[in-house]
Amino acid sequence: MRTFIVSLFLSAVLLVASHARAEGVFNPHTFTLKNGMEVVVLPNHRAPVVLHMVWYKVGSAEEPAGKSGIAHVLEHLMFKGTPKHPDGEFSTRIAEYGGQENAFTSLDYTGYYQTVASDQLDMVMELEADRMTNLVLSEEDVRTELAVVLEERNSRIETKPAARLREQSNQKLYPKDHPYGRPIIGWRDELEQLTREDALAFYKDYYAPDNAILVVAGDVTVERVKALAEQHYGPKKPSGLAPRQSLLIDAKIEGGETVLADPRVKQASWSDNIIQPSLTNGHATRVAALEILSEILGGGGTSRLYRALVIEQPLAVSVGTYYDSGQRGDGRFVFYASPLPGVELDDLKTAVYAEADKLLAAGLGQDELARVKKRMQAEAVFSRDSLKTGAWAIGGALAQGHTIEDVEKWPDRISAVTAKDVLDALKAVMDEPKRTTAKLLPQQGASQ
Amino acid sequence: MKLKWLMAVFIAVLPVQAFGVDVQRVESDKGIVAWLVEDHSNPVVAIRFAFLGGSELDPVGKKGLANLAASTMDEGAGEMDSQMFQQTLTDQSITLRFEAGYDRFSGRIKTLTENLDRSAELMNLALTQPRFDQEPVARLKSQIISGIRSSSERPGKIAYNALYQTMFDGHGYAHDSDGTVETVEAITQDDLKAFVRTRLGRENLIIGVTGDVTAEQLKVILDQAFGNLPGQPAFQHQPHTQAKVSGKLEVIERDIPQSTIVFGQAGLKRQDPDYYAVLVMNHILGGGSFTSRLYDEVREKRGLAYSVGTGNYPMALAGVLIGSAATENARVAETVDVIRTEWARMANGDITEAELTSAKNYVMGSFPLTLTSTDTIARVLVSMQINDLGLEYLDRRKTYIGAVSRDDVNRVARTLLKPDALDIIIVGRPAGIVSKP
């Protein structure tokens, strides 16, 4: 349904998208409108279909104190109407042509997209440009939509023990008042207090052409996109918004362990969340090495952790790692596992780190590294198989303050990584003091 | 008023775009048939296939058999043990997977063109010489059981399982494809071997292929992958059935702030002459993501739920029309009232010309938008064959939907929708609602 919250998805796409041959991954065409709006075009003529996306460089990280959830609430409200297209006509018109549409909010960006027959590009662009500056909200719209968002919070968080644990544990990973320290969907008590004025103020502050990126992928030419973009988005006045603030705050984090036991939990699980550099603040080689490290240690059924903990010992039903490299703030390296019945979470954790130690002690063979790199390169070919992948990867990269080159030249960086780089990255992960542990446990009787 | 005017304008400018995809029927030397869409723009090939007959055929006491077979057939085959098989796939970047649905046992390959031969060999090994070694079978069993346990308290899972149990008591559809902890534990290596021996034959195999391969090349691949399967599978298909509807309302108590509501009754199968009419009807009732009657009444006007919707699910042996919503416990009664009211309003057969037109336009226009990757095209090629839709279906589909009249939709709504017989399952702690058998 409408709106989803982006957390890990994008970095996974970026990872998939990022490994390719020397000529680049997606080979996008780019230009900038006079008002500062960036435009990316990815022609693909397989089907008479086009994906139109607008990304705003604003996410939950920009929310004023006490207004958590406003970025996401505004995203919902963007479908209400304008003087020219009132009463939910946005969705009605798109549906009228069989179009698919949705929107999403993350820590760092908010995005809107439609998939339509390619001769409807003009129509969706007119609608999207219109609501960039002309949104009208009634008190009634806001009241009803806040109720919807509270139900969304119920669905996503309150009824899911694992999600409640993530929310609690996250408080220990980011210092109090850090922009990443609040849930994207917002705290319930703050959500309940949000108003129409809050939404409109946030809208006015951040929705403008010079804070937006247009991405069009599919059965179009660069010339056509250029003409339409100049027609619809071109007349919008730039807001002259100041550059985004750095999110790198060197404050002390609480760290430590969060345990959530609930009678509705039937499978225990454990994760360690470790602050690591992101593409924004990290050396490019380190970031690429962390990507490779995550593949080697915890990427699927042939990874080192899976072999050791799920097949050989066995202690776990599942185990893996992931690395969030795209964020504007710090990145995050995560270990996670679910135990077999009777296995303690602490023993599982010990076994996971024993495998990491083993890799550090014995080193990484050239053959293993080469195989992982080859596999990552192949992913680039697959990533071109779908209309979406390139649009998401490039839109996300630009919205998070990275460049097209960061995406297109990633394959070169991956191939440049040495075994020593990977081990250095692992050592940094192991030694990093900014880390938290989250444990989900079954519990008989009342929930905590 | 305003809305109607707009719609009239839209109809006038509705695009007529030919789909322009050429579907070929390819038959190999050994008589294996596949439908193919060639696309040489990217060096990737996607193969999707299905053996008719899925988890609804799992024997009582061994529910979850098809699913466990799907999870273990790629865990070692021929001379290769589990890790060697998986490592080979990983190193060649070959995706090779199986999946068990109620009605089909499906498989897929996605590979770079340069590894297509190797993919076919590996698929053939998995289909004809799976090892089912003790270690991987035990490992996958424990993973499946862990998954069954984790999802056993998920409100949606509880609710859907209860609804299918109500609608298909005594039939294979009553059971979750995953099985239960006990039935999965009871499955043996012999059961898995028997599954492969009896269920996978050339006669019940349907194949769709899209991507960087020519018809001539594909003939060879088809024989490599499927040529030595047995002809006729050794099992009996189950008879057709009908979802039972009783108008029951069941509350399954859970201590959570929000209740999950699912509701359903009999729908139509794919072969039903009214299938296109029910697609259009469902879109108006609850199928449209942000435009249906239920969306308007439940979410847009009252803010009762984040998601609400319905779908007609045409299974091989029965069709069902199922919907869902989730709302805080205090507002469940109101939500159920609104749903019942909309069900009844639709059953009265009062759709407007404007609703009909926009629904038809949506159903016509949305389908081609999904055909943007080799995978999705290959999957549609399989469905087209299973449902006997013909090679020209992609071009003809618009005509079929265009022919649906307001009378058709009103008639289908009147006969299909029975507001008093709607089965409703609620998981949570809904205020002021008690179960009614």
Image (cartoon, coloured by chain):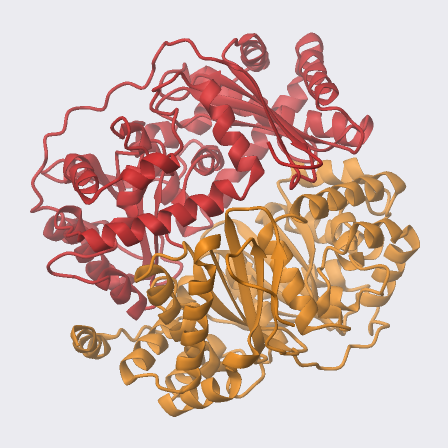
Chain colours: A red, B orange
Q: Where's residue B358, x and y in %?
A: 31, 75
Q: Quadrant of the N terminus of chain B?
A: bottom left
Q: Quadrant of the C terminus of chain B?
A: bottom right
Q: Where's residue A107, x and y in %?
A: 36, 32
Residue B52 seen in this snapshot:
no
Residue B433 seen in this snapshot:
yes
> Viewed as shown, does residue B260 lie left or right of B299?
right
Q: In the current view of this chain or complex, which residue is farthest to the right?
A: B190
> Viewed as shown, does residue A290 lie left or right of A68?
right
- Above or below, B391 against A335 in this view is below
Quadrant of residue A46 in the image? bottom left
Front residue (pair B32, A207): A207
- Above or below, B384 against A393 in this view is below
- Above or below, B115 against B221 in this view is above
**Which residue shows up at 82% across the image and 77% down it?**
B236
> Viewed as shown, does residue A355 lie left or right of B229?
left
> Viewed as shown, does residue B49 lie left or right of B340?
right
Say how many tags the image has: 0
Front residue (pair A97, A388): A97
Front residue (pair B47, B180): B180
Quadrant of residue A327 in the image? top left
Quadrant of residue B263 in the image? bottom right
Q: Where's residue A444, x and y in %?
A: 71, 36
Q: Where's residue A160, x and y in %?
A: 55, 41
